Amino acid sequence: MRNQGRLSCVAQAMTDVDQSFWRDGARDGRRRIEDYGLIGDRETAALVSRTGSIDWLCWPRFDSGACLAALLGNAENGFWRVAPRANVKDAFRRYRGNTLILESRFVTEEGEVELVDLMPLRGKASDIVRIVRGRSGKVRMRSVLDLRFDYGALRPLVDQVNGYEISALAGPHAVILRSSCHLKVEGSAICCDFELRAGESVEFVLTYFASYCGLPDPVDPYAALGETERFWSEWAGRCTYEGPYREQVVRSLITLKALTYRPTGGTVAAATTSLPEKTGGTRNWDYRYCWLRDAAFMLLAFVHAGYKEEAQAWRNWLLRAVAGEPSHVKPLYALDGDKEVFERELPWLSGFNGGRPVRVGNAAHDQLQIDVFGEMIDAFHLARKHGLPDHKRTDYLQRSLLKVLESRWRQPDSGIWEIRARPRHFVHSKALAWVAFDRMVREEGNGAWDAVRRTIRNEVLDKGFNADRKAFRRDYDSDDLDASTLLLPLVGIIDPNDPRAVGTTHAIERDLMENGLVLRYRSDTAPDGLPPGEGAFLSCSFWLADNYHLQGRREEAVALFERLCGLSNDLGLLAEEYDPVHEAMLGNFPQALSHVGLINTAYNLSAARGPAVDRLGNGH
């Protein structure tokens, strides 16, 4: 590693884990999801707070056990903070251009420094590079890395290799921290205290490797910085969107790329687990897996933006994941397509702002969710429509899925919201069953499939519509509203300007909106048996904007879309939900489906034929 200018390194005693140094990241005792930024190497990701603390990191992949888990607990669960020792008067951050390189600037009474964080594209090992540069004055800095494997439960064995390299070992996991500044072990942490003047810099590289393998070669942090910047800039430059929301679309595409597991092409729903959907609540789920439900949405976002290679990789992941016995199709899978995603609780973690329990794994993997059949077959249909090279397995798989669905579509299921109470006849689920048969009829005109398609549609329009309320209901046995019915006109089962679709839009505006944002359902009528209360689900608000657009309410569509874009944090990242009362992000972060919604709605508002029109048909 190289060091620019004069650098002085000093050692300083540390009390235990230096809790107060980490706690500087919380304001008024509470943390905010929007205070975090994302870095990643396309196989895993880390969350960096605006105060320079990495509070979430899973190695070696997205769904591995976290080795820095302070996000869901406290400093005792692992963090790595690089920050000034003096009080920070002001702070700024941004991504470097259209990349995933995070630049944070801290201003103190002593001077100003810049912290550059990135995860280089993975080679033989996975690395985090942190470069600290002095910009003015003389700033006293401190780095504290306190690793905890197994989601913050396991302290590693720390060994000082030499003055500039320290390793940590925990079972199969090993890391090594290398720096241009002298490192020291203090308690369980690896620390470094230094001073920076203008033009000086200190570099840190943290490398993960399997403990039973040899020590990886050192990484040149500046070469890694240049290679990482070139990759992301070139990749983002391929985006074909040229409308008024290009900045937001490109950032969302970069986020989706960062959440896509490079070896398989599967995209995780989010980089985190158990960020609560209500502050201090129990609706805390693990989203570090791939959901079949996202299939068509994701594919459309990639192909419309010009990323057919990514769309094809996602389609191929879908094919591999469900290969085998179609009757055993799961709603979600691990990154490699594994079906076993067992759920458990981690009682030693106190949760984000007290939101417990903290869960890893997801029990929804074993539910019947009928809508995933429609999303899968629609994704295959759209792949052909957009000219993706066909796969020899697709036709066989489609037919096998339809045979299973033909015998199951009448069953109650757990639905799009993955309820953990009794299954119901959800209107959205039935509508997506219709989509599965409709897409096959569009391609083949098969008389047998057409009969099933018509039967399902007639039942949805009969049992799923509440004539008194002039809106589609959540399920056949309830008059409650559900925002998932906004998807009915978007998938083509009913014309967007049909009075029943327009009436549903109006009903949701009246009864499911809070401060201009859409709730999935009213919490006092929640179908899942869990304690009530959650934020507005951002994807539902994007669906409402799409309905506005298709129903000729363009000004309202644009206004809602621009408001949703404004709910991103200063780095352009969106969570799953938003609290419209307390104006704070909720749920896992960053959320792939929220960014998919942004991309698709931007195209709907900016193109003559956007993703919404893509999914419409004349199969009524």
Image (cartoon, helix red, strand yellow):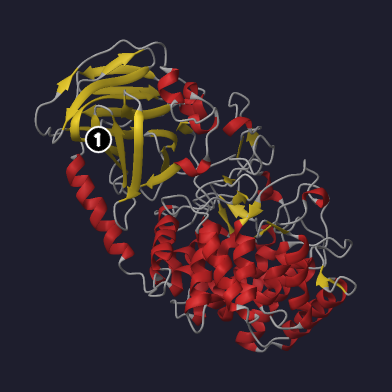
Using the image, determine if residue 409 lies above or below residue 74.
Answer: below
- Choose between 209 and 1: the one closer to the eye: 1
**SS at badge 1:** strand
Side (left or right) of 186 relative to 355? left
Which quadrant of the rendered structure holds the C terminus? bottom right
Using the image, determine if residue 22 lies above or below residue 340.
Answer: above
Alpha-carbon neighbours of circle 1 within 10 Å: few (<14), some, or many (≥20)?
many
Question: From where the camera sits, is residue 522 visible?
Answer: yes
- Choose between 409 and 277: the one closer to the eye: 277
What residue sits right under mark 1 in the picture?
Answer: 113
- Choose between 519 and 211: the one closer to the eye: 519
Q: In the image, residue 513 lies at what x, y percent? A: 71, 59
Q: Residue furthest left?
A: 5
Using the image, determine if residue 571 lies above or below residue 203.
Answer: below
Q: In the image, residue 543 lies at what x, y percent? A: 62, 67
The amino acid type, in three-letter code, at marker 1 is: Val
Q: In the image, residue 150 lies at what x, y percent? A: 50, 28
Side (left or right) of 360 relative to 4? right
Question: From where the camera sits, is residue 320 visible?
Answer: no
| Residue in the image at 74% along x and 60% along y | 512
| Residue in the image at 62% along x and 80% along y | 550
Side (left or right) of 11 relative to 488? left
Side (left or right) of 344 relative to 392? right
| Residue in the image at 73% along x and 82% along y | 449
